[in-house]
Amino acid sequence: MTLRTNIVLDPKLIARAMKKAGTRTMRETIDIALREYVSKPDYDALLKLAASGTIDPAYDPKAADRPAARVGEANAAYGARKGVRKRPARR
């Protein structure tokens, strides 16, 4: 479903957005911008829950946006097992 509308936009802002998004039309630029905007998490609802005391105060809603910390393995020596012979190279 599409909606046709007329809106007044800042031409410099549209030009910057088109360049940044790599788009060739205003319609495509606005479509990408709106999809990006609505795909962002809604932190307001989480903040309201936090204020109600339902969520642990140590909970960080933005932690999901960051890559998970890697857990190192002590003395990990991959491929360094003794007694395993390598196959001879094929000719």
Image (cartoon, grey):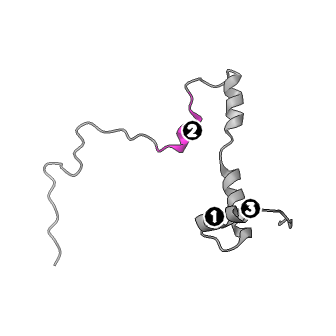
Q: Which residue is mark 1?
A: 16
Identify the image quadrant of residue 74: top left
Q: How far from the left and from the top, in percent, is residue 63? A: 53, 38
Q: Depth-wise, is mark 2 or mark 1 nearer the camera? A: 1
Give the mark, 2 or 1, whose residue is nearer the N terminus.
1
Q: Which residue is disc 3 drawn over?
A: 10
Side of 10 relative to 74 (left or right): right
Give me the C-alpha separation between circle 3 and circle 1.
10 Å
Packing grade of label 2 (10 A; few <14, some 14-19, many >=20) is few
Magenta-colored span:
59-67
Q: Secondary structure at mark 3?
A: loop
Task: Please tell me whether mark 1 sits on a helix, a strand or a loop.
Answer: helix
In three-dimensional space, the C-alpha distance between marks 2 and 1, rounded to whole angstroms, equals: 28 Å
Q: Which of the two residues, 53 or 19, is positioned nearer the viewer here?
A: 19
User: Which of marks 1 and 3 precedes in the sequence?
Assistant: 3
Disc 2 residue type (three-letter): Lys
To which quarter of the image does residue 51 belong?
top right
- Residue at the spot 72% in from the left edge and 57% down from the top edge: 34
